Amino acid sequence: MQLWNLKSRAHECARTGRPFAEKEVFHTAIYFDKVTGEFQRRDVGLDVWEEEIAERKPFSFWKTEYQPPGGDARAKIEIASRESAESLLRRLVEEDEPESENARYILALMLERKKILVPKEVKHTEQGKMVLYENRKSGEVYIIRDPELRLDEMGQVQDEVAMLLGFGGPAAEAAAAVGMKITTEGKVVPASG
């Protein structure tokens, strides 16, 4: 089993130990450790990036702006309403069960659409197309395989995700009985929409 989610953004440079300043730009690099079979993350300052890549070759890397933990109350309220989709994605990624692969992909797309996750890079590997996402606030990285769903499969997977998020079951059946449906965002809309 591979670990497909990685630790959150570091608060200091992995090479020097120097703390990052607010809004400082640095490199986030993802490495595959052949010994453990897991992906690892290293956040490295721009001033020592050349040393970093001379020493080890990353699987993927990008520039990130450091944001210290915390924030204003409005941001916390906004995150709370979306937290269930993100916590579900985190749980499914940690479990890494093959049958949840489609749901993980749909959840990542939902969170991307809500601007919680930002796609950083797409890599083509033996396992298929892998999308590396970074959480805009925490810096947590997810590696999600694109299952290349066909259009006719999307509805079923969206329903599965809605059930996992608690928008299915009896509530969905009650909504359907009156010609409505519950979206994966938790909104009640006409069934034809």
Image (spheres, rainbow, N blue to C red):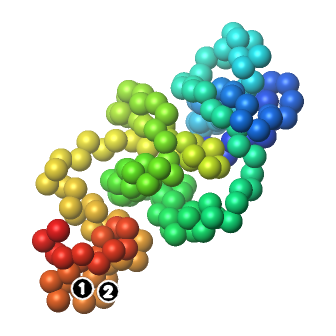
**Residue at horizontal 69%, vertical 27%?**
26
- Label 2 crowd (10 A; few <14 / some 14-19 / many >=20): some
Q: In the structure shown, which secondary structural element does the residue marked by tag 2 occupy?
A: helix
Q: Residue 128: percent from the left, percent from the top? A: 35, 33
Residue type at numbered disc 1: Ala
Answer with left or right where residue 113 lies relative to residue 71: left
**Quarter that holds the C terminus:** bottom left
Figure check: 65 above or below 113:
above
Answer with left or right where residue 178 lies relative to residue 8: left
Answer with left or right where residue 123 lies relative to residue 56: left
Residue highlighted by disc 2: 171
> Can residue 163 be seen from the camera position used here?
no
Q: Residue 188: percent from the left, percent from the top? A: 29, 78
**Residue at horizontal 40%, vertical 77%?**
166
Q: In the structure shown, which secondary structural element does the residue marked by tag 1 occupy?
A: helix
Residue type at numbered disc 2: Ala
Q: Residue 173: percent from the left, percent from the top? A: 24, 86
**Residue at horizontal 16%, vertical 75%?**
191
Q: Nearer the viewer, residue 13 or 143?
A: 13
Residue highlighted by disc 1: 175
Q: Quadrant of residue 54?
A: top right
**Residue at horizontal 42%, vertical 28%?**
123
Q: Nearer the viewer, residue 189 or 160?
A: 189
- Label 1 crowd (10 A; few <14 / some 14-19 / many >=20): some
Q: Quadrant of residue 129?
A: top left
State how far apart marks 1 and 2 are (Cα): 6 Å
Answer with left or right where residue 56 lies relative to residue 109: right
Q: Nearer the viewer, residue 79 or 106?
A: 79
Q: Are marks 1 and 2 in contact (CB under 8 Å)?
A: yes
Q: Residue 184: percent from the left, percent from the top? A: 34, 67
> Can residue 105 be seen from the camera position used here?
yes
